[in-house]
Image: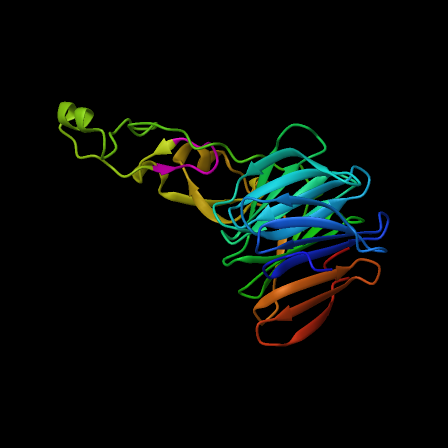
Amino acid sequence: IPTHQGRVTVVLFVLEMEWVLSTGQDKNFTWHCSESGTQLGLYRTTAWVSGLQFDVETRHAFVGDYSGQVTILKLELDSCSLVTTFKGHTGNVTALCWDPVQRVLFSGSADHSIIMWDIGGGKGTAIELQGHNEKVQGLCYAPHTRQLISCSSDGGIVIWNMDVTRQETPEWLDSDSCQKCEQPFFWNFKQMWDSKKIGLRQHHCRKCGQAVCGKCSAKRSTIPLMGFEFEVRVCDSCHESITDEDRAPTATFHDSKHSIVYMHYEPTMGWLLTSGADKVVKLWDMTPVVS
């Protein structure tokens, strides 16, 4: 089907609709009838697409692109309409995964993060998952156990337990001085002059979002229910409020020992297929950890 003027980036076959969805570096998103090859529609994206998912029941296409934006389109037989767009990544979207039961969309990014978007709940909730040190390369979901499988270019495979009540990360607050000790930050010239104090560098507590100085946020902690499986900066009061139970991990970490560029999960057999930059394909039995 001659459709794109640039390299095709993602192709998706929708058996129930007899559609073929495709995207390219020419920023074209198209869908064709798989039987006749007839083009049914075309949509121009803001950047070239690197992730694509489709929900048969609602006919919604989820499009992730290199600007870090995710777009939801409503597809019809001969047209489409824009539903909404949202952006939470600082890097390009590298992978998408859709859970049609919980109506949740997962997006992975080059910024090392994963975001869980509550599409069906209508609350606009976005839960961050921080468990990779390099670019997220693939996402798969095991609906029967509510576990998310993610992989990254450094070979890391993370199994996330999504059957827990997670908390949304707070927005970072703005302030001209530390919201704990009230010492001025380095751009607050007036307060520095009045108090005869040197301005400090601004940081943020990952748990409460307050703007704090380094002295008031010298401690680190994991906050798994907020998606922070690695230790992050927290203010002194938040550090005291985090219990050992709060630090209980909600993910397990595994090393594939090759730089993963693609992954696919087969839930019936419990097998995970990974291919790497080393030109090696590996088949994993995931039943001991995805259960």
In the rendered image, is residue 116 in sight? Answer: yes
Q: Where are the magenta residues, as a range?
A: 203-210
Would residue 216 appear left or right of 169 to someone viewing this image? left
Instruction: Name the magenta segment's main secondary structure.
Output: loop
Residue 102's place in the image compared with 182, above or below, is below
Whole-percent x and y of residue 289?
72, 59
In the rendered image, is residue 94 in sight? Answer: no
- Front-most of residues 153 and 197: 153
Whole-percent x and y of residue 182?
28, 26
- Front-most of residues 183 and 153: 153
- Front-most of residues 4 and 56: 4
Whole-percent x and y of residue 26?
57, 54
Whole-percent x and y of residue 103?
74, 38
Q: Is residue 267 magenta?
A: no
In what quadrant of the picture does the N terminus appear?
bottom right
Residue 217's place in the image compared with 291, above or below, is above
Would residue 37 appear left or right of 258 to someone viewing this image? right
Q: How many marks?
A: 0
Would residue 44 appear left or right of 184 to someone viewing this image? right
> Which residue is at 19% across, 25% downward?
191
In what quadrant of the picture does the C terminus appear?
bottom right
